[in-house]
Amino acid sequence: MKAPRPAWLTEEAGQSDMMRLECPFCGIRDETEFRYGGEADLAMPQWDAADPQWADYLFFRDNRKGVHAEQWCHVRGCGQWFRILRDTATHRLGGEPEARG
Ligand SMILES: [Zn+2]
């Protein structure tokens, strides 16, 4: 039996009970076509940076509540990576999706 979706998610998704993302190449698609790629805009440390700086870059994320820059890949579509802004509390998307190189 399928677990009921939280009201805050179904209200955001409209008629569908799943999150929908906008690929900059293909348009709006269901979340099942995408793979989450983690936080966007991380600054890689210099090659000679200390171990704690590398550990912070490689292993630790802010995981904050609110608007968050993320990378997504349209794995069941065009296969391209892109960056979006998403509110982690409401799943509301903001800004224009940007293609990643
Ligand atoms: Zn796509």
Image (cartoon, rainbow, N blue to C red):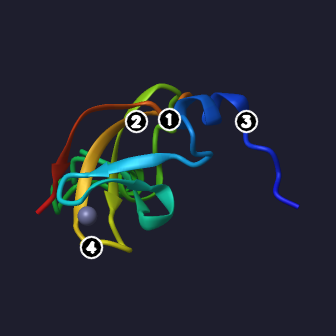
- Check residue 22 in the rendering and tell me which mark sits there, or answer none: none
Q: Residue at x 60, y 29 (%)?
A: 11
User: Where is residue 22 shown, x and y percent of the image?
Assistant: 31, 48
Crowd band around label 3 with a 10 angstrom C-alpha radius: few (<14), some (14–19), many (20+): few
Query: Which SS class for mark 1?
Result: loop
Q: Is residue 24 left or right of residue 17?
A: left
Mark 4 touches mark 1? (CB < 8 Å): no
- The image position of residue 75, as x and y in percent, is 36, 73
Label 1, on which residue?
91
Secondary structure at badge 3 equals loop
Query: Disc 3 residue type?
Result: Pro
Amino acid type for the residue under numbered disc 4: Gly
Position of residue 79 in the picture relative to residue 14 (left or right): left
Q: CA distance from mark 1 to mark 3?
A: 12 Å
**Which mark's residue is nearer the viewer, 2 or 3?**
3
Extreme right residue here? 1
Q: Is residue 57 above or below residue 35?
A: above
What residue would you read off at disc 3? 6
Q: CA distance from mark 2 to mark 3?
A: 18 Å
- Which residue is depicted at the point 29% across and 47% down? 40
Kindly indicate the quadrant of the structure image that contains residue 72: bottom left
